[in-house]
Image (cartoon, rainbow, N blue to C red):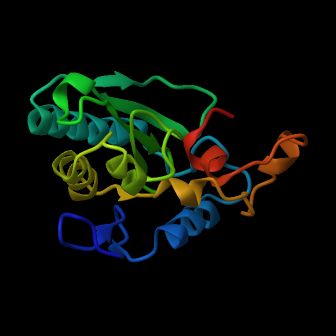
Amino acid sequence: MTSRCGWNWPERGRGRVDDPAEALREADRLAGPDHLEFPGTFDLPRERSHLSALVERLNSEFSCRCQVSEGIQDASFLATVGIPAAATQASEGIAIRLSNFGGLAVVAAEGFGIYDDLDEAQAHGALTEADRRKAECAVTELGYVPIPEPLLHRPYDGVTGLPSFYPHETVTWWTRFFDYL
């Protein structure tokens, strides 16, 4: 699959990624059934360095100071980066969440789950093509794999026993890689 940057999406350390759904499954398989918050190979200082580089890039691209929520615990994600509404052409914020697994990332207009995907956000005027390109290019060029939100709302059917922890809820791929546990 090709990004708006004009080249194939990478996955840090593993070359290019043509199928975001396969990137989810591979990250799940590689982590194995016992690693819910982060994989055994997780290197927090390295991931924080990648996060800092992303924030610097976004600050430059949007001429702003992005808000960063980090120091997250009991979760399958590292941080959420918020591009302030005042820095975007549509006057709506952009949120980017980084998973602890496989360099996965999700980009959303206004917030997660508000629109089905970035195309819908653009259709509703909550995101411009230029801002979408800046956010997606920053993510991909720094080695993250952008995962479209609709893929994340599918029921989780991976290798962990995660659904057994939530017997009365539908566990999704969002829960597996981008949520509090």
Taking the image as shown, residue 58 lies to the left or right of residue 94, namely: left
99 or 124: nearer the eye?
Answer: 124
Q: Residue at x 15, y 31 (%)?
A: 59
Give the x, y percent position of residue 162.
Answer: 78, 48
66 or 23: nearer the eye?
Answer: 66
Q: Is residue 69 above or below residue 12?
A: above
Look at the image and tell me in which quarter the N terminus lies: bottom left
State which quadrant residue 19 falls in: bottom left
Look at the image and tell me in which quarter the C terminus lies: top right
Give the x, y percent position of residue 108.
Answer: 40, 43
Q: Is residue 8 above or below residue 115?
A: below
Q: Residue at x 55, y 62 (%)?
A: 27
Taking the image as shown, residue 90 lies to the left or right of residue 80, namely: left
Q: Is residue 2 above or below residue 111?
A: below
Give the x, y percent position of residue 3.
Answer: 27, 67
Q: Residue at x 87, y 47 (%)?
A: 164
Please give the count of numbered marks on the rendered protein. 0
Q: Is residue 53 above or below residue 14?
A: above
Give the x, y percent position of residue 147.
Answer: 45, 58
Taking the image as shown, residue 72 lies to the left or right of residue 62, namely: right
State which quadrant residue 74 falls in: top right
